[in-house]
Image (cartoon, rainbow, N blue to C red):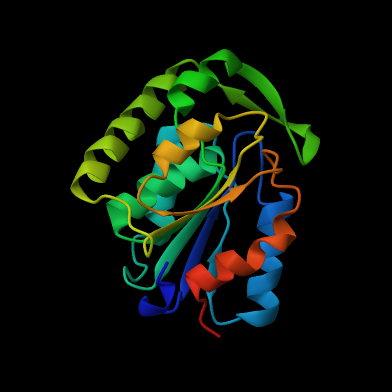
Amino acid sequence: MDATAAPATTHLLYLHGFRSSPGSAKALQVAHRMRTQHPSVVWCCPQLPPSPRAAADMIRRLTDDWPVQTSAVIGSSLGGFYARWQSLRAGWRAVLLNPAPFPQRDLARYIGEHPVWQNPDEHIFFRAEFIGELETLAADIDRLARQHPATPDRLFALLSQKDEVLDWQEMTTFCAGGSVLDLPEGDHAISDFEHHLEALIRFLRPAR
């Protein structure tokens, strides 16, 4: 991975996963690192709506004026799926944390109301029509990935071999061509994320 050849990251977007929020442990750790050691980096970690189409529209609205060469996105789980889409459509570098390769398939069994992990008093409602919205984004990813295959300097992934939610081999295929750090004992949440944060920072090279 020759991330040193890439320009320093000046704008960083973090996308959380299904039923998650900007208050997730990984999001908070990256936010703290940016705030304390890279304060010049523009940081954005929005609360994503449950509708994939609305989430995509929000991502566009928040970042369409960001510089292509120095912007990057981090995504976890479903946010990793969105991050792959955003990186391909916008030409950004991406960090994927146990990304969901097929949310259009896997989330079909989660139609209904669910509490947010970080605040059980908050709920989201995942509607049946959201599956079609995910299928549209998946088709965009497939089309764009054929035009712009992943390379080690454009995509970095942390993948847990013992992920209890997603299939590790499917995630590996989803990240093919990029630089992948396999975590033999990792779980879906990447509970030891603090031990891998430096690898992520080396890839992104955030501006000071």
Establish if 11 lies above or below 116: below
Q: Which of 196 and 56 is in front in this view?
A: 196
Measured from the top left, where is residue 50 in percent x and y? 54, 32
Measured from the top left, where is residue 12 in percent x and y? 50, 66
Q: Most extreme residue toward the front, as rendered?
A: 184
Q: Nearer the viewer, residue 175 or 25?
A: 175
Where does the C terminus fall, quadrant-wise?
bottom right
Q: Nearer the viewer, residue 163 or 80?
A: 163
Q: Which of the 4 quarters of the picture holds residue 145?
A: top left
Give the residue at x 40% y 34%. Answer: 53
Q: How many marks?
A: 0
Q: Most extreme residue toward the bottom, as rendered?
A: 208
Q: Would residue 7 be seen by someone viewing this image from the given angle?
A: no
Measured from the top left, where is residue 128 in percent x and y? 48, 15
Establish if 151 lies above or below 99: below
Measured from the top left, where is residue 13 in percent x and y? 50, 60
Where does the N terminus fall, quadrant-wise?
bottom left
Establish if 71 lies above or below 40: above
Looking at the image, residue 142 sits to the left or right of residue 47; the answer is: left
Q: Would residue 146 be seen by someone viewing this image from the given angle?
A: yes
Q: Most extreme residue toward the left, as rendered?
A: 147
